Image (cartoon, helix red, strand yellow):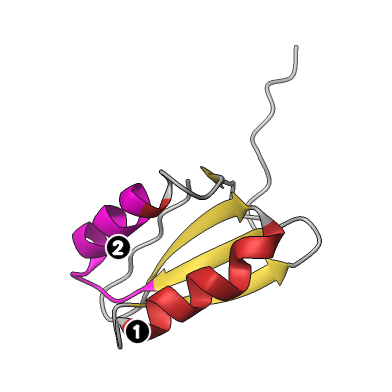
Amino acid sequence: MSTNHVSGETIKQYYRVDRREIAFLRFIFEAYDGLAVLETLDPEAGLIVFHIAPGCEGDVETILQDLQKDIMMEPAPDPDKPELTIEN
């Protein structure tokens, strides 16, 4: 899970989810007005990013933990930051 936090900006958390559940997840977070916005990065792969309002990380984490009981959801790397590789 990638977390970026710059004062005054949203915190980004990337996930891979069951693509059939993206609309449901969007609906859930729209109901929590101002808490987080879900953006679909790759609908076929189920890659999404939550843009979380500063100070709301705990609330979003609580919601996600509850949703993970019923929906396949796993942290994903930030696609804009390539993974570091160690060369021998």
Q: Position of residue 85 (x, y in %)?
A: 69, 28
Q: Which amino acid type is shown beneath numbered disc 1?
A: Ala
- Nearest the viewer among 40 and 71 is 71
At 22% from the left and 69% from the top, the residue drawn is 56
**Of the numbered discs in the image, which one, if any, rests on residue 14?**
none
Q: Earlier in the sequence, mark 2 or mark 1?
A: 1
The relative height of residue 18 versus residue 42 in the rendered view (above or below) is above
Q: Is residue 68 above or below residue 85?
A: below
Residue at the far front in the pictured view: 70
Main SS, magenta region, reads helix
Q: Let me know if residue 27 is in the magenta part.
A: no
Residue wearing tag 1? 31
Which residue was labeled with disc 2? Answer: 60
In percent of width and height, residue 3 lies at 41, 54
Tag 2: amino acid: Val
For residue 59, which quarter of the picture? bottom left
Give the magenta range. Answer: 52-66
